[in-house]
């Protein structure tokens, strides 16, 4: 196994900090976390795990349709210090978790084996009965930090402490978290937390040997779904697999793969719209509904194109494009033109997802009844395959506009990536304007066709363009949160000053507050583990 595919494990802090590829000095923060851990738990941590947040340059809401995306890790991250606790007198795997940020209350919980829930059996009796999976209560309604810690832990318990594995008894753990990724704002603090939790629980249980980046991404993807959002894998891949100075072209079909693409010398500036997107609260009418609409569009489009799909198959738009273009089972090579050609051809057919009445009265959505009829499936099959596994609600489903966004965004990603690859970071101003244009087009598509922007994001991205950005767009799920702008290196401070004067919510902030909502960022490296000596 090549070491570059394994989770990096460091024993030298100097080496670790050098590899971060960050201009900021992180030493003080790592040391402070270690000291604070010792102060609170009376001993040094055994490990400190780092998992970064991410910015998505382009490719929004297409990862769950299995199209490639172009995110990169940022130098803001979650640090998680942890150590096993003496197991005498504690239940297996009991957790005490503290956060340096006082908004996140202390936690303590123990996982229990599924068969013990409500059974009255003791751990010992359960051992004899050789019971299976683990149980951790995860609240889907509110996204507490607790949910993310538990989601990461659950995956470790499931994969490493099942009756089939040699080891059945996770150690009790103390952990302390410190984060600099703004929460709930499209920079994936959630994925960073799940990745950090997954790695922390693996580390204290001595399970890191041979663990690959891909394994952690796949575990974190599955784990984050437990929190109730049916997300794709972009955030987890970016947090684990990124390399400094590059965007990461992440593909999900036919398998998860990631390829660095050198970024041009422009600077990425992140600015928060200051609108909080309540992701869990709105999941059924926003994120999860988009997942259903794009899957239903894929089914109907394939029927129209004469592509055979089994009644129980939930084909994604990426797979439809592949089958339409005659893709081999092991996928097209990542640099071939075939995906682009097939995407362009299939775009000519998406009008089929629009009701005839749309030409007359502008109503582009279809009712559930129409959608089922168009799918050619029985009522029961359709509901089973597309609706019963996810919480999504709508009176009209926007198949045409959602498919239009997804397919055109997938093409924009390919163009953006090709420009990065062709120039290997070295580009003229004209090329930066070209990249900016793709970002602007992505913003328009998110706003007009995907309905995942909001008036504040539209306003802020326009202000960013007026302040000199080559391009500007929302990043992450949208409906609030951060924007990303591509700005000439020598214009960054002037750009930030202009934003502070122009965007309403920024005007009253002092310097320290402003630095939390507008900042330049550098593509950083993915997650790693430090073994404390
Ligand atoms: P956010 O909400 O920014 O973490 C979400 C999804 C991604 C992707 C983007 C939209 C999660 C964990 N992540 O990101 O997979 O679909 O929206 O491109 O839900
Ligand atoms: Mg998130």
Image (cartoon, grey):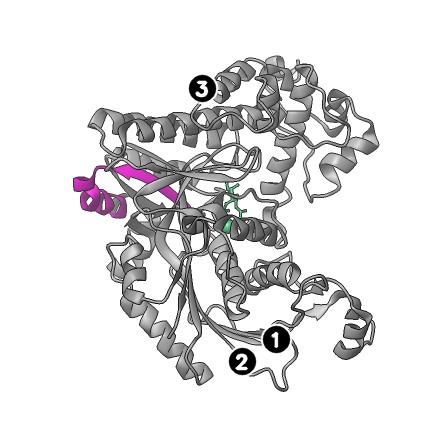
How many neighbours does mark 3 have within 10 angstroms: few (below 14), some (14-19), or many (20 or more)? Answer: few
Q: Which secondary structure, mark 2? A: loop
Number of dots carrying numbers: 3
Residue 37 position (above or below residue 77): below
How far across and how far down the image is residue 29, in percent? 32, 68
Going 38% across and 60% down the picture, which residue do you hit?
Answer: 180
Are the two marked residues, 1 and 2, in contact with CB atoms closer than 8 angstroms?
A: yes
Q: Nearer the viewer, mark 3 or mark 1?
A: 3
**Span colored in magenta:** 482-500
Q: Does the magenta portion include 487? A: yes
- Where, quadrant-wise, is the C terminus in this rendering? bottom left
Q: Nearer the viewer, residue 309 or 7?
A: 7
The circle on residue 94 is 1
Residue 161, above or below 473:
below
Query: Could you say which quadrant of the image residue 425 lies in?
Result: top left
Please give the residue where the numbered disc 3 appears in the rendered image.
337
Q: Nearer the viewer, mark 1 or mark 2?
A: 2
Mark 1 or mark 2: name the one nearer the start of the chain: 2
Q: Position of residue 244 (x, y in %)?
A: 32, 47
Q: Which residue is mark 2?
A: 85
Between the residue at mark 2 and the residue at mark 3, the CA separation in whole angstroms equals: 54 Å
**Mark 3: C-beta under 8 Å from nearest atom of ligand 1:** no
């Amino acid at each position: 196994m090549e070491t570059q595919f394994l989770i990096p494990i460091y024993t030298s802090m100097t080496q670790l900090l050098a590899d971060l590829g960050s201009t900021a000095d992180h030493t003080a923060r790592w040391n402070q976390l270690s000291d604070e851990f010792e102060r609170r738990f009376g001993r040094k941590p055994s490990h400190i795990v780092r998992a970064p947040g991410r910015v998505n340059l382009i490719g929004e809401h297409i990862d769950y349709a299995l199209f490639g995306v172009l995110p990169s890790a940022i130098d803001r991250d979650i640090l998680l210090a942890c150590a096993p606790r003496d197991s005498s007198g504690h239940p297996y795997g009991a957790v005490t978790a503290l956060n340096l940020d006082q908004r996140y209350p202390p936690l303590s919980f123990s996982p229990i084996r599924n068969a013990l829930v409500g059974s009255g059996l003791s751990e010992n009796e359960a051992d004899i009965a050789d019971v299976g999976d683990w149980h951790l209560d995860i609240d889907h309604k509110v996204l507490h930090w607790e949910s993310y810690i538990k989601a990461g832990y659950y995956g470790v318990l499931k994969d490493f402490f099942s009756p089939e594995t040699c080891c059945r008894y996770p150690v009790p753990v103390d952990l302390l978290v410190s984060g600099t990724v703004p929460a709930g704002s499209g920079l994936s603090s959630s994925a960073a937390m799940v990745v950090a939790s997954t790695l922390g629980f693996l580390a204290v249980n001595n399970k890191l040997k041979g663990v690959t980046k891909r394994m952690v991404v796949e575990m974190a993807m599955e784990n984050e779904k437990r929190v109730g959002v049916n997300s794709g894998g972009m955030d987890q891949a970016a947090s684990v697999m990124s390399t400094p100075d590059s965007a990461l072209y992440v593909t999900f079909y036919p398998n998860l793969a990631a390829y660095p693409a050198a970024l041009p010398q422009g600077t990425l500036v992140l600015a928060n719209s200051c609108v909080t997107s309540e992701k869990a609260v709105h999941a059924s009418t926003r994120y999860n509904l988009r997942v259903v609409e794009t899957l239903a569009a894929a089914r109907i489009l394939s029927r129209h194109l004469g592509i055979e799909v089994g009644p129980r198959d939930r084909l994604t738009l990426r797979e439809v494009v592949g089958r339409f273009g005659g893709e081999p089972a092991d996928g097209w090579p990542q640099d071939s033109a075939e995906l682009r050609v097939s995407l362009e051809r299939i775009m000519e057919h998406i009008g089929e997802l629009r009701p005839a009445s749309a030409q007359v009265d502008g109503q582009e959505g279809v009712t559930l009844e129409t959608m089922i009829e168009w799918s050619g499936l029985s009522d029961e099959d359709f509901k089973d395959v597309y609706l019963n596994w996810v919480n999504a609600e709508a009176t009209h489903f926007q198949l045409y506009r959602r498919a239009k966004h997804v397919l055109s965004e997938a093409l924009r990603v390919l163009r953006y990536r090709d420009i990065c690859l062709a120039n290997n970071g070295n580009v003229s101003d004209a090329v930066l304007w070209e990249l900016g244009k793709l970002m602007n087009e992505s913003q328009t598509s998110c706003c007009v066709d995907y309905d995942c922007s909001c008036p504040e994001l539209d306003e802020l991205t326009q202000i960013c363009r007026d302040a000199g950005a080559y391009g500007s767009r929302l990043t992450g799920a949208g409906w609030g949160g951060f924007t990303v702008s591509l700005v000439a290196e020598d214009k960054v401070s002037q750009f930030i000053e202009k934003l502070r004067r122009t965007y309403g919510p920024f005007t009253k902030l002092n310097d320290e507050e402003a630095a939390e909502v507008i900042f330049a960022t550098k593509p950083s490296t993915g997650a790693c583990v430090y073994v404390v000596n």
